[in-house]
Amino acid sequence: MGCEGSAIDQFIFKNTELATAPLAPEIQLHLLKPTSDLWHAFDPESTASDIQRPYWAFAWSGGQSLARYLLDNPDLAKGKRILDFGSGCGITAIAAAKTGAASVLASDIDPVAIAAILINGRINGVDVDTVCEDLIFSENRGWDLILAGDIWYTTRLSRHGLHWLRKLVGEGCEVLAADPGRQFSPSRGLMPLTTYSARSVPDVDHPGFQEVCVSRVLPSADSADTSLGVR
Ligand SMILES: C[S@@+](CC[C@H](N)C(=O)[O-])C[C@H]1O[C@@H](n2cnc3c(N)ncnc32)[C@H](O)[C@@H]1O
């Protein structure tokens, strides 16, 4: 982006409107507004391919489902030190903070997402710490529970991300993921817990409701296995 924090905030306010997602109406978020030029980032016909996709401006169906699961099962997050990996707009991190987590760290590799998470956290009256870093392959920094909403959309996230998460599970951390059946969804290493019918807001890539599975990530059977049966 090449702009200061307040300029990033202005960029977020200019391109978004306050909205809620159907599965978690108790959380307010700055989400992409229909008049924003950023829509072109998802248009396959657009020549504006240099626009970085603003994943932070959406409440994806996976993150929404994980938020709903936490809000309905508050004991899951209560008192825990939590990482929301690939946090985007921060919906899952905010749900974790609302249900009494001891601490919540939201990670993303996009600095605009980090600013959006801080703005959205403030609107909802919760404290969420942030880190703009690719944490794949990092050591556990004290997390009891890691949340991963709608992240299986690249081979890197599916292969290396899942391998990393399963390693942390083997070391005693709990990991919950939620996924609407993305292109690179793993076909093994996950134990389904429940499903939701959810619609991303705005539903730019998949109009309408999708079935989203919330799963527990299982420990690696073989820590050398990085294939993980990606579809
Ligand atoms: C599809 S969005 C999902 C956001 C949010 N979890 C939700 O469900 O609404 C995926 C997010 O993961 C972030 N991301 C991609 N690779 C990452 C990585 N290696 N580490 C942290 N975040 C990453 C992207 O920038 C994006 O914000």
Image: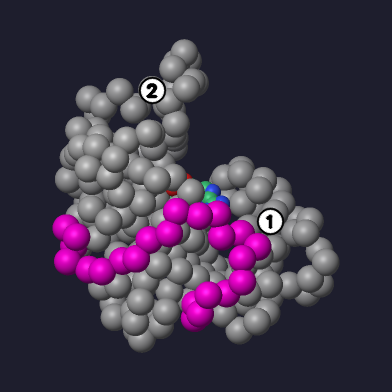
Which secondary structure is most common in the magenta stretch? loop
Q: Residue at x 34, y 28 (%)?
A: 38
Q: Is residue 90 visible?
A: yes
Closer to the camera in the image, 9 or 69: 9
Along the polypeptide, which appears first: circle 1 or circle 2?
2
Verify whether residue 14 appears in magenta.
no
Range drawn in magenta: 122-144
Q: Residue at x 79, y 71 (%)?
A: 223
In the rendered image, which residue does mark 2 sit on? 40
- Residue type highlighted by circle 2: His
Q: Residue at x 34, y 66 (%)?
A: 129
Q: Quadrant of residue 87?
A: bottom left
Look at the numbered disc 2 and give the secondary structure of its residue.
Answer: helix
Residue 198 x/y as whole percent: 38, 52
Residue 33 x/y as whole percent: 23, 33
Q: Quadrant of residue 53?
A: top left
